[in-house]
Image (cartoon, rainbow, N blue to C red):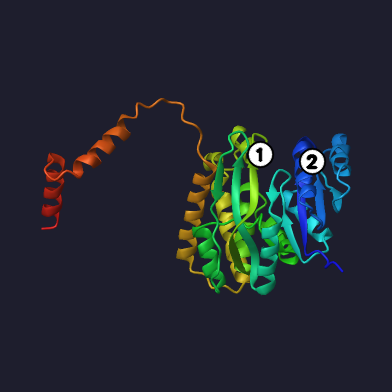
Amino acid sequence: MQSPPLVTLIVPTVHHRAELYARTLRYLGGIGWRAPIVVSDHSPEAHAGVIAEATRGHAGLDLKLLRHPPQMHFLARLSACATAAQTPYVHLHADDDFVVPETLDKLVEAMQRDDACSAAMGINLHAFVETGEMQVIAKDGLAHSGAFERLVAQLESYSSALYALRRRDELIASFAFTLARCPDVQFWQYLESCVAALRGTFVMLDELHYVRSQHAQKWSAVLARERSPDHFPYLILSPALQERVAAFRAALLEACAEANAGVDAARLDAGLIHLLHRGFDAVGLPQRTATSSGSAKASGKAMLERLNRPHDAARTALERIFNLANG
């Protein structure tokens, strides 16, 4: 007798991504996926049948389609899907991405062995469709027994838990906490994973787990093209930035209180600065439009080479500076 499934995939989608959604369903059908899939469709009424039609083409999959209003918050839609799931674990699966089921099985085993674990993940990749280029998405496990230590580690070396294996009830609670405090698109992503870190450890396996497809329709690419003031990098220039950082920090303190985690304010603030710096860097900056001769870089390289020559005038001058400065 076959064991009941332990994981439900949660797939959010919308009418204009129907081809991507159908591609993911073809993939899941091709690998013989048998566990439940709950789909959130937030297409407007005029396009209500598009995702339903794509779903009907995959009768071999255990699919449950939920219709949500277009204005419904992303986390609220995911929570509704998790509430509809009947398995102890859930896994968010974008409509254009690909999970590796063999690794997912190992992640389930890891979480079953450790009640203190709130998220489990393996190696995540970015796959660039046009070029075939692959990039590893840097993620770290969080093994600290102390909740505040896990939070500081998460702030300093952030690992998103959004596309990790999660316990169903923990994910619903984490999303509810986040949505009530930081609904804006940049900081809810950070807060949700930080709350998960406060609530438990993160397991990280050295196995390919999840492949994120990169393409022009990707949400992050659209935001960058539209110069969205709600998301990095253009959020940096928005007058709303300080207010949102303050709300995020206040939510972290509240989450620490709920977790009975003692707070070192100086370490929290230093970690928050690291997180913001990472956010600026991870999203990227606008493309430069001014041309550069490259002379500054070339000059710097040449100077470093001169400093390695024992009798060069620049090295002699530098040695004299150090000797005089040191007495």
Callout 1 crowding tier (Cα within 10 Å): few <14, some 14–19, many ≥20: few
The residue sitting at 75% across, 44% down in the picture is 24
Q: Is residue 283 above or below residue 154?
A: above
> In this picture, is 56 found above or below 180?
above
Residue 17 placement: quadrant? top right
Pointer 2: residues within 10 angstroms few (<14), some, or many (20+)? some
Where does residue 161 sit, x and y in percent of width and height? 63, 58
Which of the labelled discs sits on residue 122, or is there none?
Answer: none
Q: Nearer the viewer, residue 27 or 241?
A: 27
Q: Tell me what residue is drawn at x 63 percent, y 52 percent.
A: 189
Residue 69 in view: yes
Name the amino acid, label 1: Lys
Give the residue at mark 2.
22
Image position, residue 299 (x, y; %): 27, 34
The residue that disc 1 covers is 218
The local secondary structure at tag 1 comes to loop
Q: Nearer the viewer, residue 42 or 123?
A: 123
Give left or right: position of 5 versus 140.
Answer: right
Say whether residue 115 is visible: no
Q: Residue 128 lies in what quarter of the image?
A: top right
